[in-house]
Amino acid sequence: MTDGRPGEELAEELAEELGEELGEAGEELDEARRRLAEAQGRVVAALVAGAELPRGFDPERMRAQASSLVAKRRGIVARIRPDAAAAAGPDLPAAFAAYARSRSEPPPGYRADADDFAAWLRERGRLPDPPRKPRWWSRFLP
């Protein structure tokens, strides 16, 4: 039932009252979300970039998980860039682990990770420069 006022007016008044009541709770929720995001960032940094472990985490389990993540990345990178995997040869696990440790965070995708690993190998003389493609117009030259 309404008290004779239009529904829109009543809804606005109720929303205003509810907003005032939830204002503090909403701010607390936003703060909790911010703290959670920071904590998650610290965990990710510890797993992928070798940052300091957050308090309360088992170092051995975190090392095992970090090693597993590097192995997963290495496997995907080897499928995307078999030339880089072949260039690293049997040393691929150690080479990729060194590459992964040299970065503060992994690239934003597997393709970028694979290309960055290939560039990392190239910088160390382990992967030759790709052959240059002839220019389209060069076929018209004598």
Image: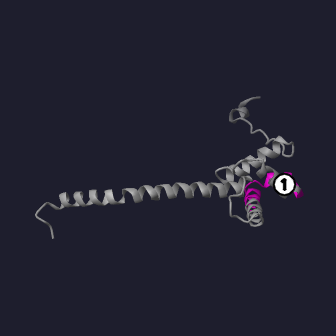
Does residue 142 appear left or right of residue 8 in this picture?
right
Compared with 139, 63 (above or below) is below
- Residue farthest to the bottom, as pictured: 1
State the SS at label 1: helix
Q: Quadrant of residue 4?
A: bottom left
Does residue 24 appear left or right of residue 115 in this picture?
left
- Residue farthest to the top, as pictured: 142
Where residue 89 sits in the image (x, y, percent)? Answer: 87, 55
Q: Name the foreground residue: 108 vs 64.
A: 64
Q: Residue at x 61, y 58 (%)?
A: 40
Does residue 58 appear left or right of residue 15 in this picture?
right
- Residue farthest to the right, as pictured: 90
Q: Residue at x 68, y 54 (%)?
A: 45
Whether residue 28 appears in magenta in the rendering, the answer is no
The part of the chain drawn in magenta is 72-90
Residue corresponding to mark 1 = 86
Looking at the magenta stretch, what is its main secondary structure? helix
Q: Residues within 10 Å of mark 1 (few under 14, many from 20)?
A: some
